[in-house]
Amino acid sequence: MKNMNTDFHENILKVMKSGVSKHLVDASLTLVWGNDAFYRLLDCEKEEFQNRYVEFCSCFEAMPQYFEVLKKAIAEAQKHNQEHMECDLIIQDIHGQQHWIRCSGTMIPQKDQTIIYFVYTIMDDVYHSQQLSQESLDECLNDLEWMMSEYTGNVYISDMDTYELLYVNQRACDTLQRTEAQLLGKKCYKAIQGRTSPCPFCTNAFLKKKETYSWEFYNPVLKRTFIIKDRALNWKGHKARIELSYDMYTSEYKLAKKDQEREAILKTIPGGMARIDARDSSTVLWYNGIFLDMIGYTKEQFESELHSQCDYLNSNDLRRIQKMVKSLKHTGDNIVFEAKAYTRAKEERLWTVTLCYISAEDSWDGIPSYYSVGLDVTEERKQMEKLRYKAEKDALTGIYNRETLQSYVDTYIAEHPNSKNALFMIDTDDFKLINDTHGHMVGDVVLSEMAAGMKKIMRKQDLVGRIGGDEFAIFMEEISSYEDAKQKAKELVNVFHHLFDQEKKEIEVSCSIGIAIYPEDGDSFNKLYGCADKALYQAKTQGKNGYAFFDSDTMDMIKMMDRSSYVTSIDSEQSYAESTDNLARYVFRILYQMDDIKTAIQMILEIVGKQFDVSRAYVFESTEDGAYTNNTYEWCNEGVTAQMKHLQHISYADLHDYTSLFNDQGIFYCRDIHTLDEELIKVFDQQDIHSTLQCAIKQNDFFAGFIGFDECSGLRLWTKEEVSTLTLIAQILAVFMQLKPTK
């Protein structure tokens, strides 16, 4: 970086998605320059920043200690003649919102003044995870305080600098014959030893974190000898000393009681807890009941099937963790991480785990160990994924929406400026005709199948999105030449042309494609979109069902007028127009004139079934209490197996609330039953049903059954006219069935 031209590399830094700023290495780290992402990090424009902040350090005015951390990191790097430094900070934007960031700096000596470039990585998600872990640790701290209160020996904690008592348990109060209020805040040497100055035998100078200092002492005030264990710890912000002591003459009894109480207390702490043998970083020595619940094993199953090993963890995560924990033996720090775990039923779960190391010297049984607390965060992550999916995906087709596609494309271009890519704009030819001829329900199916076809033939790394209405876009990453894009365009045209070849009633679908190439035709999504849109227009003028590359000369020749496809839209709501054709009138006359309603219904099912060439037409009626539904009428086309005798006394309420499948108009339409839940697929497969159209029978808003029409020979697209007519006939049948009871 030293040899690069400053203007050149600052132009490069301007387009980076990460925040970058340039400073003088002086007392206030004077800001010289920042890119757009830097000001976005502070949620302001450059002018707002200059008006709001006098110096760069003002960004840390809420927590000035982090500005000192930053300066200290720079000074440390200079001390060791290093060009680079890195530290984690909290920075505050112009509205007071705080962000956890990782600041990476590179120093460049100049003739008169050293400058430094900072690159900022937002760590809010990591910080939030750490906060969650900290909350868990705080909860454990509360549990620890409870354990100390229940401990059968004496416990007190004192400030190592001021000697003031910070905590005493009830046992210590009883031993000293004072109340907690009389002891807290008093000097430990005064309250315990009756002295006016620190004890000459005080062990503070010998105490270390993670190490226990054991000794015996005869207290002349109490006239008793105590076995004592002291240790240094951080207690609620104080550099403190914790002391555990018990009367040596009753030590065996008290130790036994301590162990019993410790086990009982640990098993009540929320979160899975385990002790792992540090000698192999795999054997589980101890665990609580919640741990077993989290992995779905009983004690016997865990020991006999997993042999008390950490095999419930994902193998890659386990190897990663075993590498991480090696450092704990030297640093004494805690680590927090996420890992995948598997239950006995092979269900994958996501855990957040905190680990700390206890050496053999400090361990009660001489075994070095890792103590862990695990929290299952699977459901929270699933909810976050659902929200992210909903924000990024188009509701009808399940592919990216326009905003997400644009963001991903612009990000990719910024991170791969030297790549060669292609943007396809795809428009469905004469889509309005499909809607007008077959209805909006069929139109929605066409769009969904087109999206599925695109994803099937494109590479995994390519981005597929719906721009709006019947228009789609595809971004091909890393193409070697125009030929790659050309070949893929041919494949797309062919796929769409044969999309519905297997349907009983074929529907014609074709598309036109416009293609723009990065970087020749534009350096952003919007620019590429504009060129691809013009190329799409050219493909339309050439006869549709084809593709065209953007060519500025060709565009000038045909004098293309401004055209925007952004606002193209499709009304995907199902709309059914009532038909007044002869068949519906004929059905009405039969029902009106015939006294035998049962014979009339059976006749109508046959007439309608043959007229529309369906496989099966039938009626289901609910019992009076609505608990069960029976197949009361059925007509089957030639070669189709009757099902009525197998479909009696059925509880559709057990099938994921079957009534929820019907829309507000009382219609349940499914072109392909294999898009339903597995339980429903099984029900329809048993009847050899591929497509179905069902119309609800309602009595005073009560679901009283339904009238259905099935296709058993293959998938079927019902036209707008078919849906309208069958719906009307079903409604007429439902009315007469209520006026002329069949039972």
Image (tube, rainbow, N blue to C red):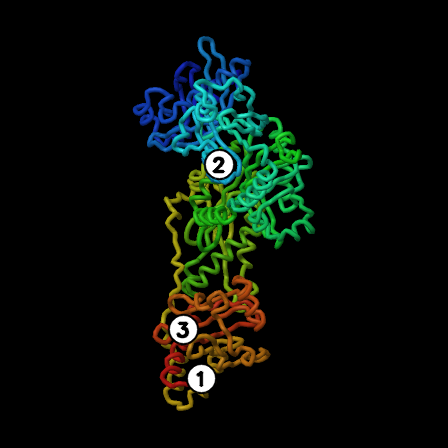
Mark drawn on residue 703: 3
Asked if 193 appears above or below 572 in the picture, the reply is: above
Q: Crowding at label 3, few (<14), some or many (≥20) Cα neighbours within 10 Å?
A: some
Q: Are marks 1 and 3 in contact (CB under 8 Å)?
A: no
**What residue occupies the far left of the structure in this picture?**
51
Q: Which quadrant is the C terminus positioned in?
A: bottom left
| Distance between mark 1 and mark 2 Cα atoms | 87 Å
Which residue is at 44% across, 15% downward?
25
- Residue drawn at x 50%, y 49% is 379
Q: Secondary structure at mark 1?
A: helix
Q: Residue at x 36, y 87 (%)?
A: 592
Near-viewer residue (110 or 318): 318
**Kind of element beneath mark 3:** strand
Q: Secondary structure at mark 2?
A: helix
Q: Residue 601 got which mark?
A: 1
**Residue 228 visible:** no
Q: Is residue 499 something that shows in the picture?
A: yes
Image location (x, y in percent) of residue 741 = 39, 85
At label 1, counting other C-alpha atoms closer than 10 Å, the crowd grade (few under 14, some 14-19, many 20 or more) is: many
- Percent from the top left, x then y, of residue 376? 53, 46
Toward the front, the furthest residue is 223
Q: Return the x and y of residue 678 as percentages of the image width and height.
A: 55, 63
Disc on res. 171? 2
